[in-house]
Amino acid sequence: MKIGIYGGTFNPPHLGHMTSARLAMEMLGLDRLLFVPAAIPPHKALPEGSPSPEDRLAMTVIAADSLLLRDKVAVDDLELRREGKSFTVDTLRQFREEYPGDELWFLMGSDMLFSLPEWHLPEEICALAGLAAFARSEGDEPERMEVQAERMRADYGARVTVLRLPEVVEVSSTRLRAQLAGGEGAEFLPPSVYGYILRMGLYGTHKDLRHLTDAELRACSLSMVYAKRHAHILGVEEEAVRLARRWGADEELARRAGILHDCTKYLELEQQLQICDEYGIVLDDLERISVKLLHSKTGAALARHLYGQPEEICQAIFWHTTGKADMTRLEKIIYLADYMEPNRDFPGVEELRKLCYEDLDAALQMGLEMSIEELRERGVPIHRNTQGALDWLLEHRKG
């Protein structure tokens, strides 16, 4: 198995890191890639005001997840667990013990390739892993890198490959940190990483979470869920705005409800229950044991108390999973947008999409009936509010 090891302070992890990692995986044919955040770099002190190791680890996990390669990409905290300075040779020794029969590749930028002879025990580093060096700016000359690679081969018997990346995202971490403090730089980060920075107030951002722009709110929401959920959240936002436009609802309320509707989707049952207890959300017996029923309630609570959203948005999020009798227009829109957004694919979804733009109540009835039928087929209990929503529609649509 070929394993790539990508170390660094990741302060913060940005698109330059992610682009280089993705392309290196493809060009080297890696089976696995491990990001390894450094605790105390031996060659330089972390800048004043840098986030804690825990925050840098969390950002790196979020950034790695954004590559959507969970079966191949992971983050290892071994350097954060190790006391003292993070010497690369110690890290590679540990990986060699853990993966004795595998082919290790240490990924680095051109600056690291040129400075490696000055590192601690460079000859042992070269014995433990191959070196894969990539350009970190378009000004890097592959020819110079090849000369240095040949020197490493001659001096240390190193196994070196120079990766000529077809795509280079030029990002200076120093400049990016300054930009973030000035309210700029989001375009150089995975949106979910930027959202984490905003939520935690890192790099001098200190945003008021109750007064975020749509883009900032979206980034915060995406930072709270796995990347595999991002397409769905963006799809619900997109569909909710279209439905609001069609039926004369407030498009901005629909947008923000769509952005936040799944923000607590991946919290564990215990965490969901803690939020419900904290904000006085009353639960029935089924809800207390079903984590899938809780994220709408906890998401509404955070929309209200953390992000300061209007009550119409909070109520639309609260009811988007089960529905309820006598739903408002916005509640219907979010329920249906969640059900049939563009990424959904199941029998009958195209018919439901068409009906959503012809008769909102008829579409809601169809969606509820389909949901109830699916739950019955799976042997899952039907929540009383879902049945109540359908019963109310059946009664009032007759009239």
Image: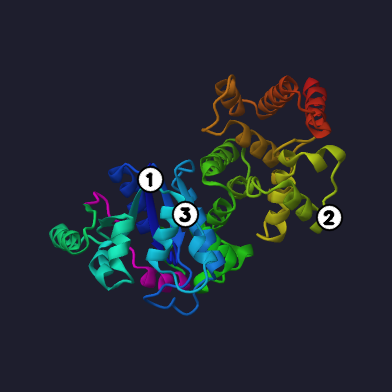
Residue beneath disc 3:
63
Identify the residue at image location x=56%, y=71%: 206
Residue beneath disc 1:
102
Above-or-below relation of 294 to 337: below
Task: Find residue 262 and report its horizontal and vertical position in percent.
Answer: 63, 45
Residue beneath disc 2:
280
State the count of labels. 3
Picture quarter with the C terminus: top right
Identify the secondary structure beneath mark 2. Answer: loop
Task: Find residue 187 and report its horizontal and vertical position in percent.
Answer: 40, 59
Real-space CA distance between mark 2 and mark 3, rounded to the nearest whole angstrom: 34 Å
Give the mark toward the camera: 3 or 1: 1
Left or right of 387? Residue 81 is left
Query: Label 2 amino acid?
Result: Gly
Task: Find residue 223 and report its horizontal and vertical position in percent.
Answer: 55, 54
Q: Which region shows up in magenta? A: 164-182
The mark nearer the N terminus, 2 or 3, is 3
